[in-house]
Amino acid sequence: MGIKLQLPEEVTALAFAIDLARKNKGYTLQQLGELSGIDKGQISRFAAGRFKTISKNLQQICNILELDPNDYRVVGSRIPSHVLTEIERGWHSSGTQRRKFEDALVALSKMFS
């Protein structure tokens, strides 16, 4: 059994990171599924935040995308909980606000990669 995430913000932050990393690497859900051996439907659920634990399959996807899922946990994390709350707020926005939020995170991720 995997590590249970404690807060909804942890799930939201990791889900956004998975979706963003997949898009930045140019993978479709199908391609990522072929690389990982994991069904694209399950990958879609991960990217949508429909998980509660860091399972073996979730870890496999993170490995391919060069993410450490533990970086998105509040307990022992480098990310303060108030930042995770803002990420969750932006994640749940829509329309123009959502696109601006995504563009800002893409730019930010490029600064640190």
Image (spheres, rainbow, N blue to C red):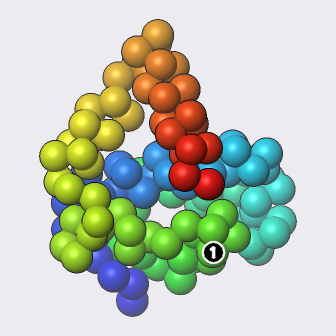
Identity of the residue drawn at 55% across and 52% down: 112
Left or right side of 44 for 24: right
Identity of the residue drawn at 39% across and 84% down: 2
Left or right side of 10 for 48: right
**Vertical arrangement, residue 94 with respect to residue 57, above or below:** above
Check disc 1 and give the amino acid type: Asn
**Vertical arrangement, residue 46 with respect to residue 19, above or below:** below
Left or right side of 3 for 100: right
Identity of the residue drawn at 76% across and 62% down: 33
Residue extending furthest toward the bottom: 1
Identity of the residue drawn at 70% across and 45% down: 24
Res 85 → quadrant: top left
Residue 50 is at least partly visible in this image: no
Quadrant location of the N terminus in the rendered image: bottom left
**Vertical arrangement, residue 94 with respect to residue 32, above or below:** above
Residue 53 is at least partly visible in this image: yes
Residue under label 1, please give it.
63
Which of the pair 84/110 is nearer the observer? 110
**Vertical arrangement, residue 36 with respect to residue 100, above or below:** below
Left or right side of 53 for 34: right
User: Judging from the image, what secondary structure is the residue with disc 1 in?
Assistant: helix
Give how far across and how far down residue 7 sits, in percent.
20, 60
